[in-house]
Amino acid sequence: MSISPSRTKQVALIVEDDPTLLDLVTETVESLGHEVHSASSQEDALRLLEDTMFDYVLVDLSIPLKEGRFPRLEIGFNLLDRIVSLPDARRPGIIVMTAHGDDHEFCRRALLAGADDFIKKPFDSGKESPEQAIKELLAKRQEARAEASGARYDAGSSGESAAGDAVGRPSGAAMDGGPPSIHLVGTYDRRRCNMEINGKELLLSEQRFRLFARLAVHAKRAPGQHLSLLDVPEIQSGTRQALNRLRKDLESQFPGFWDRWIRNDGHGSYCLQVPSDSITYDADAMAAHTELLGLLLK
């Protein structure tokens, strides 16, 4: 695999089967001083993703499976799934280039599938240009990495007691390198539910919070055992999509957590691999989630 720890250039992959558009986007990326690789099919893109660590991918979802085949949107969405499933340390940022930019359902589907942003074709030179989208994406990723580093530093350097009305909450955050402390709160803030990892507040949609809480409850009651998510009521739109959305949300707020602490058995079952005493909860706040609180109190 081509990975250089000392590289200074951003490395981009462009997936586009239209030669004219490929040339246009390549010029834009090169003008930013970034290294460019290109693919015109899913097969070519996967080969490059296996060999090279990319900082970001610009992808047209209407691509063929192989060179010379007919392009189809489903091929592009399958590629998107493959990129999103890469380990977090290797997962590039994803910008979808699309002629369906006015189709809100298409854009929603792309974002839910794991895209970070999308830009409409034909491109303009303003707010929705490839150059602007790339700069914004890289800035967001840099900010997320800085926040994660700060959270790890705070977790490792804090030795203060976390006294309060939390039920069984450990004093102090987990040291860097050890298992994280997870505190389920569940109160609503702007229609999102809050929780904490190593003292850092995370906000999740109610569905994603309840799904994560299911994993946490199971880890507390049956440490090391996998939970089948096929019948979990919090999942309303399919296990894979729900897990991808939860993973993306957690990764954006606490990078590296999912790959390090969540395991799956390849058959629809998942395990949050932390000690049971690392998981605590606020009983008063969790009363809003009656079924989950009942499981915690068993």
Image: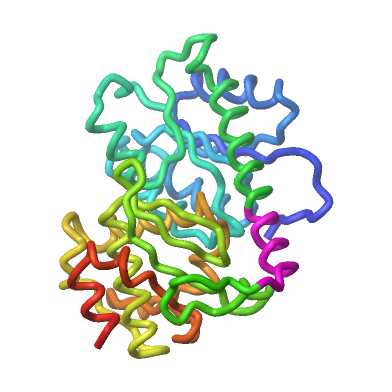
The residue sitting at the right extreme is: 6
**In the image, residue 183 lies at what x, y percent?**
45, 69
**In the image, residue 9 lies at what x, y percent?**
76, 38
* Residue bounds of the magenta highlight: 148-160
Q: Is residue 258 left or right of residue 89?
A: left
Residue at image coords 69%, 56% = 149
**In the image, residue 181 lies at what x, y percent?**
53, 74
Q: Is residue 229 left or right of residue 82?
A: left
Classify the position of the C terminus by image quarter.
Answer: bottom left
**In the image, residue 196 lies at what x, y percent?**
48, 62
Q: Nearer the viewer, residue 244 or 291?
A: 291
Residue 61 lies, with reference to residue 207, above or below; the image says above
Q: Nearer the viewer, residue 204 or 90?
A: 204
The residue sitting at the front extreme is: 164
Q: Is residue 259 magenta?
A: no
The residue sitting at the top extreme is: 125
Residue at image coords 66%, 35% = 36
Q: Nearer the viewer, residue 167 or 87?
A: 167
Residue 7 lies, with reference to residue 282, above or below; the image says above
Q: Nearer the viewer, residue 259 or 155?
A: 155
Classify the position of the N terminus by image quarter.
Answer: bottom right
Quarter where residue 110 is shown:
top left
Q: Is residue 158 magenta?
A: yes
Q: Is residue 9 left or right of residue 196?
A: right
Residue at image coords 59%, 56% = 90
Residue at image coords 38%, 82% = 219
Quarter where residue 195 is shown:
bottom left
Q: Main secondary structure of the magenta part?
A: helix
Residue 144 lies, with reference to residue 194, above or below; the image says above
